[in-house]
């Protein structure tokens, strides 16, 4: 999403104490069939709404979320993605760059703060969010269970306090009793006579109760000691019960969160994309990829290609000899070795015990493969044998090599850069391919060389290379590694001059691709079986159409 697609309201649209309106295009994940789709997102009055496009924004929204209770979570790995959720309803959103993503998050959080439902980073000092609580007990105090836990904790504290006071007071009383009894024999005769003269209510003198006071004092001390011991035991039991209750509540919350996550995980989402831990079943994975290719094919069929202002001439066609500029280039040794090997192997017999298996057949076209896996990744070498009438080998390789026409027949191509023009017959390309969910986006850096060989044979060889200006696995793309050879050989009836009516070109298309990342082996092989024949038919049909009515180039 560019800055032109992200707009906010001016000051006239901002009410006192309110927030500015924000609107623009974001990628929203729809479902496992259609993956990410561009949607027009509008943020207004604490409500997040989305529309299929800006033109449809006056026809009613397709969905809305109230931000007062929403959670906004940036993705852990994707710098452009963030998720907005209310309960188990989640919107997966992607901006075109991290700056725009952060702008959206900041505005969304500002609505939450103003509404008093701030996230964990909110406090009373940053916009009036919920006050931070000091402990688990205080957090629980908002419910009846919390109030019960708080009262229990208070009563335990009171018991501790009263127990300490009772212990101190009983000790003091015992000291007073002991002092009184100890001092009785030291009292003078006159005082003793006075004390003996005092009679209690039972008619007995006070001096006769000294032993009883001593016995009662000892009994009171024992009673207090037993009471304190019992209180301490009860307090310990209540503390243990409180810890158990707190642990039970924490376990309950943890299980509740796990259940919520499991419920969300059961719904196909963008995190189910390719990877060794993907939970998307193989059949659904293939359905999503197949839908993506179908969409590309529909777009290609609907695209109206304007007539080219350029006409093919002899200079653009592959040269009959190797350009001298290539032979002095640092890549020449590798280019010559791999090209020679690929051309020799292109027309080798696929029968016998060399492991080739026929997996598709249609008319003159035969598709073969050998099943090869390296570190769990499918790297099946593929070979296609085909025949095209009315087109020469030189013309076929011209359209395959020349970058001018590549966008017209390569439907999966998103972007192409010519990194280096080595010579008239060799270039270095960097290509980015369209992303099809749930497969990660790929790119490739390779040299491409076209050359003539014996027996009216021309070939184009593409092979991965390296360049410090185009590092692998950068910009969110996984680098794939390729070795591709399109070898074409033309024939015509003996004794006849080649023409559009009698020329036949045999094609051998060989491809070995390291996908650079994990994807289900069964899915990849199913895609190969479906897409490679379609690609070869599409390309050869395109060349035949381009050559119709033009002089034959041999």
Image (cartoon, rainbow, N blue to C red):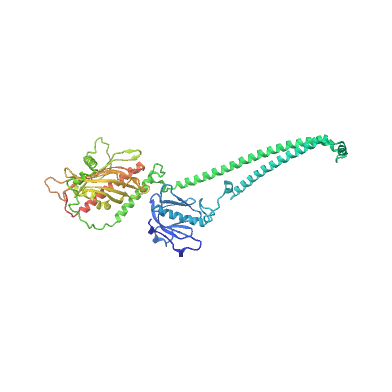
Query: Between residues 531 and 345, which one lies in front from this camera angle?
Result: 345
Residue 164 location, x and y as percent? Answer: 68, 41
Residue furthest toward the left? 495
Query: Between residues 111 and 400, which one lies in front from this camera angle?
Result: 111
User: Vertically, is 189 above or below 440?
Assistant: above
Residue 157 location, x and y as percent? Answer: 65, 44
User: Vertically, is 116 above or below 196?
Assistant: below
Total numbered badges shown on the rendered structure: 0
Which of the image's four quarters has the N terminus? bottom left
Q: Please report the residue visible at 11 percent of the width from the left and 46 percent of the height from the top.
A: 495
Query: Between residues 331 and 94, which one lies in front from this camera angle?
Result: 331
Q: Is residue 506 visible?
A: no
Residue 95 location, x and y as percent? Answer: 40, 53
Residue furthest toward the bottom? 12
Query: Between residues 552 and 525, which one lies in front from this camera angle?
Result: 552
User: Vertically, is 186 above or below 267?
Assistant: above
Q: Is residue 153 visible?
A: yes
Q: Is 135 left or right of 155, judged from the image as shown?
A: left
Residue 295 location, x and y as percent? Answer: 33, 52
User: Vertically, is 400 above or below 354?
Assistant: below
Q: Is 177 left or right of 101, judged from the image as shown?
A: right
């Amino acid at each position: 999403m560019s800055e032109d697609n992200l707009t906010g309201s001016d000051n006239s649209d901002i009410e006192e104490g309110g927030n500015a309106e924000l609107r623009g295009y974001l990628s929203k994940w729809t479902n496992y069939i259609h993956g990410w789709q561009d949607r027009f997102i509008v943020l207004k009055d604490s409500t997040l709404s989305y529309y299929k496009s800006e033109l449809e924004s006056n026809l009613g929204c397709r969905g809305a979320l109230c931000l007062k209770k929403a959670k906004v979570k940036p993705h852990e790995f994707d710098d452009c993605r963030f998720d907005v959720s209310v309960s188990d309803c989640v919107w997966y959103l992607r901006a075109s760059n991290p700056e725009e993503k952060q702008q959206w998050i900041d505005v969304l959080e500002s609505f939450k703060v103003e509404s008093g439902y701030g996230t964990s980073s909110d406090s009373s000092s940053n916009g009036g969010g919920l006050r931070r609580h000091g402990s688990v007990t205080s957090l629980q105090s908002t419910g009846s269970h919390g109030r019960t836990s708080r009262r229990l904790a208070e009563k335990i504290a009171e018991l501790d306090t009263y127990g300490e006071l009772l212990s101190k007071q009983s000790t003091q009383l015992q000291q007073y009793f002991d002092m009184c009894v100890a001092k009785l024999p030291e009292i003078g005769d006159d005082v003793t006579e006075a004390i003996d003269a005092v009679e209690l209510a039972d008619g007995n003198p006070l001096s006769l109760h000294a032993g009883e006071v001593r016995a009662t004092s000892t009994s009171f001390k024992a009673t207090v000691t037993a009471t304190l011991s019992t209180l301490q035991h009860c307090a310990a039991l209540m503390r243990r019960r409180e810890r158990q209750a707190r642990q039970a509540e924490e376990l309950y919350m943890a299980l509740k969160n796990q259940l919520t996550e499991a419920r969300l995980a059961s719904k196909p989402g963008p995190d189910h994309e390719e990877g060794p831990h993907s939970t998307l079943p193989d059949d659904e994975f293939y359905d999503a990829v197949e839908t993506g290719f179908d969409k590309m094919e529909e777009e290609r069929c609907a695209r109206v290609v304007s007539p080219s202002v350029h006409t093919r001439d002899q200079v653009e066609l592959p040269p009959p000899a190797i350009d001298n500029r290539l032979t002095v280039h640092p890549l020449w040794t590798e280019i010559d070795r791999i090209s020679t090997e690929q051309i020799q192997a292109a027309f080798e017999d696929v029968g016998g015990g060399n492991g080739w298996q026929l997996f598709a057949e249609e008319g003159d076209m035969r598709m073969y493969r050998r099943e090869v896996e390296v570190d769990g990744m499918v790297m099946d070498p593929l070979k296609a044998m085909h025949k095209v009438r009315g087109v020469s080998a030189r013309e076929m390789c011209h359209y395959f090599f020349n970058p001018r026409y590549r966008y017209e027949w390569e439907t999966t191509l998103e972007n192409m850069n010519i990194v280096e023009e080595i010579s008239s017959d060799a270039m270095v390309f960097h290509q980015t391919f369209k992303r099809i969910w749930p497969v990660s986006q790929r790119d490739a850096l390779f040299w491409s060389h076209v050359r003539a060989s014996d027996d009216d044979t021309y070939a184009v060889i593409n092979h991965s290379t390296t360049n410090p200006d185009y590092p692998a696995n950068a910009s969110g793309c996984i680098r794939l590694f390729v070795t591709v050879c399109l070898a074409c050989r033309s024939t015509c009836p003996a004794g006849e001059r080649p023409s559009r009516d009698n020329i036949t070109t045999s094609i051998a298309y060989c491809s070995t691709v390291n996908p650079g990342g994990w994807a289900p082996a069964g899915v990849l092989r199913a895609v190969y079986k479906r897409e490679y024949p379609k690609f070869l038919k599409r390309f050869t049909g395109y060349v035949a159409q381009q050559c119709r009515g033009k002089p034959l180039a041999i």
